[in-house]
Amino acid sequence: MENLIIKQKLEDATQYAYCAFRRFPKSERFVLVADLKRSLIRMLEMVIRANKSRDKLTALYNIDVELEVFRSLIRLSMDLKFLPLKQYEILSNKMAEFGRLLGGWIRQSREYRQRQG
């Protein structure tokens, strides 16, 4: 697979998130942390699938939905004091950068689809 910048940004965010998740209480590691990790892995899988897909737009919208789910869970983690504010800010910034790249990819795919008729 070609080296996609968006894939690299998501991998970087995932690596940071996994380190941050170690600080969560044990009671949440099998529930909330598992959901957060699953969401990150799903996004990574969907980025790879979107890159290989002919109908990228549908795949990209699915990634966007999963990103919103992840953001909500991270916000909840911070509100519950499982994730310190500084780590929340760093992870949010990393995911915002991923989101901007995703938005650009969606726009590019939408324009391509319109040109194709």
Image: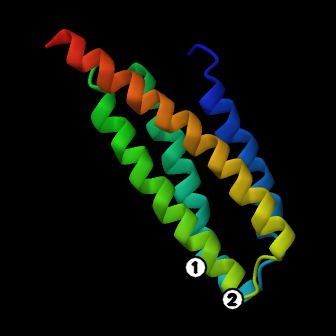
Mark 2 residue element: loop
58 to 95, vertically: above or below = above
> Is 5 above or below relative to 63?
above
On the image, the x and y values in percent for residue 32 come to 59, 77
Residue drawn at (78%, 64%) of the image = 89
Local crowd size for mark 2, using a 10 Å CA cut-off: few (<14), some (14–19), many (≥20): few
Tell me if 101 is positioned left or right of 50 in this view: right
Relative to 109, 41 lies left or right: right
Q: Relative to 117, is 86 above or below?
A: below
Q: Quadrant of the C terminus?
A: top left
Residue 36: % across, % down:
59, 65
The amino acid type of the residue labelled 1 equals Val
Q: Are marks 1 and 2 in contact (CB under 8 Å)?
A: no
For the residue pair 80 and 41, the one nearer the viewer reads as: 80
Q: Position of residue 55 (x, y in %)?
A: 26, 25
- Residue at the extreme left: 117
Please name whichever residue, 28 or 88, is drawn nearer the observer in this view of the structure. 88
Q: What number is the disc on residue 80?
A: 2
The amino acid type, in three-letter code, at marker 2 is Leu
User: How far across and how far down the image is residue 18, in percent?
Assistant: 76, 58
Q: What label does residue 31 carry, if any?
A: 1
Real-space CA distance between mark 1 and mark 2, rounded to the nearest whole angstrom? 14 Å
